[in-house]
Image: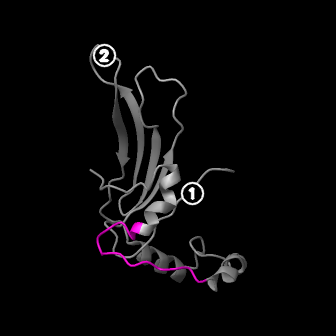
Amino acid sequence: WAGVPFLIRAGKSLSMTATEVLVKLKQAPISRLGPAQGNYFRLRLGPELSISLGARVKRPGPQLVSMASELMAVRQDCCDEIDPYERLLTDAMHGDALLFVRSDAVEAAWAIVEPILGNATPLFDYEPGTWGPMEADGLASEIGGWHNPQGVA
């Protein structure tokens, strides 16, 4: 994964609440359907669960022109599904440690995080309901900008 950029955007009162992984694939070196954005995989982890594949496909008709297309699978909620915290507490009461972190893993994480806690990073204000401070836009400008999640249809 050397050289692969990973961007994480987190904040309070952003435009929407979504936990999403977007994997942008490289563009094909030669395209007979004209220039277009690359294909992608999207994994929506919350609040709705979905998996999407975005691809450029040939537009119907005689011209060799592409159009965006997305194939999406959305998980349908069951009637008896429990909330995440309810599951966590139930597992704790039953002694199931699968969702819990071991103490050595917590200590290893603190060994990484603690040295940077004292660094004074500037904080920028932003309006509630936006995608965060404008200063954040410059962080991703060299690789095509931020991806803003959209609601699942």
Query: Is 61 within the magenta?
Result: no
Residue 91, image x, y percentages: 52, 76
**Residue 72: where, in percent of width, then height?**
36, 43
Label 2 near label 1: C-beta < 8 Å? no
Q: CA distance from mark 1 to mark 2?
A: 37 Å
Residue 103 appearing in the image: no
Q: Secondary structure at mark 2?
A: loop
Q: Is residue 129 shown in magenta?
A: yes
Q: Residue at x 48, y 55 (%)?
A: 141
Q: Residue at x 31, y 75 (%)?
A: 127
Q: Position of residue 86 (x, y in %)?
A: 41, 77
Q: Secondary structure at mark 1?
A: loop
Locate residue 115 relative to residue 30 in the image: left or right. Answer: right
Q: Residue farthest to the bottom? A: 118
**Stretch in magenta:** 120-134
Whether residue 80 is visible to the viewer of this picture, yes or no, is yes
Q: In the rendered image of this protein, does residue 15 appear above or below residue 71?
A: below
Residue sitting at x 59%, y 83%: 120
Question: Which SS does the magenta portion mostly show?
Answer: loop
Q: Which residue is mark 1?
A: 6
Tell me the number on the disc at residue 77.
none
Q: Please tell me whether residue 57 is drawn above or below residue 103 in the rendered image.
A: above
**N-terminal of the two: label 1 or label 2?**
1
Q: Is residue 76 above or below residue 120?
A: above
What kind of residue is marked 2? Gln
Say which mark, if any, is on residue 63.
2
Residue density around tag 1, few if under 14, some if 14–19, many if 20 or more, within 10 Å: few
Dot 2: few (<14), some (14–19), or many (≥20) neighbours within 10 Å?
A: few
Q: Could you say which quadrant of the image residue 56 lies in? A: top left
